[in-house]
Amino acid sequence: MALYSEKVMDHFRNPRNVGVIENADGVGEVGNAKCGDIMKIYLKIENDIIADVKFETFGCASAIASSSMATELIKGKPVSEALALTNQAVAEALDGLPAHKVHCSVLAEEAIKNALKDYYAKSNME
Ligand code: FES
């Protein structure tokens, strides 16, 4: 029985949207104190749409696959949809994560939420 789904392996081996956005509209960083993994999300937002998104993840395979999938799920979507993205949705899109790896997808949800918070703070909105 394989521990990881093919989608997890695919996104781990070929992560989408890796990198940095210079002058990003929002940047969010989160870490997990237990495993020490860190995830950083950069957003470019135009007319309330996630025009571009990039990530840097220093972490486990599941964290990298989760960041990659999460960026794919919010790219081109309205800000409201990005805000509503849950770690369950990320894990489901990856065809599931092992139970002890679910917290890795939580990092992706939190990093995106933090980046949106940063965006709202910068643009002086609630
Ligand atoms: Fe830390 Fe996966 S083990 S994010």
Image (cartoon, rainbow, N blue to C red):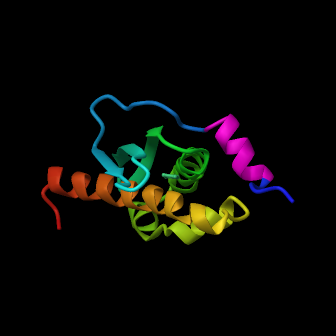
Which of the two residues, 12 or 45, is positioned nearer the viewer here? 12
Q: Is residue 12 magenta?
A: yes
**Which residue is depicted at the point 47% across and 63% down?**
106
**Side of 77 relative to 40 (left or right):** right
The mark tally for this picture is 0
Which of the two residues, 106 or 125, is positioned nearer the viewer here? 106
Place residue 42 in its image quadrant: top left
Chief SS of the magenta region: helix
Q: Is residue 97 magenta?
A: no
**Side of 91 relative to 44 (left or right):** right
Q: Which segment did they paint magenta?
A: 6-15
Q: Is residue 45 above or below residue 3?
A: above
Place residue 34 in its image quadrant: bottom left
**Side of 55 relative to 11 (left or right):** left
Can you name the residue that lies furthest to the right here? Answer: 1
Can you name the residue that lies furthest to the front here? Answer: 34
**Side of 96 relative to 42 (left or right):** right
Q: Position of residue 24 (x, y in %)?
A: 30, 37
Q: Position of residue 77 (x, y in %)?
A: 50, 57
Can you name the residue that lies furthest to the left here? Answer: 124
**Which residue is depicted at the point 35% across and 60% down?**
113
- Classify the position of the N terminus by image quarter: bottom right
- Classify the position of the C terminus by image quarter: bottom left
Q: Position of residue 57 (x, y in %)?
A: 46, 40
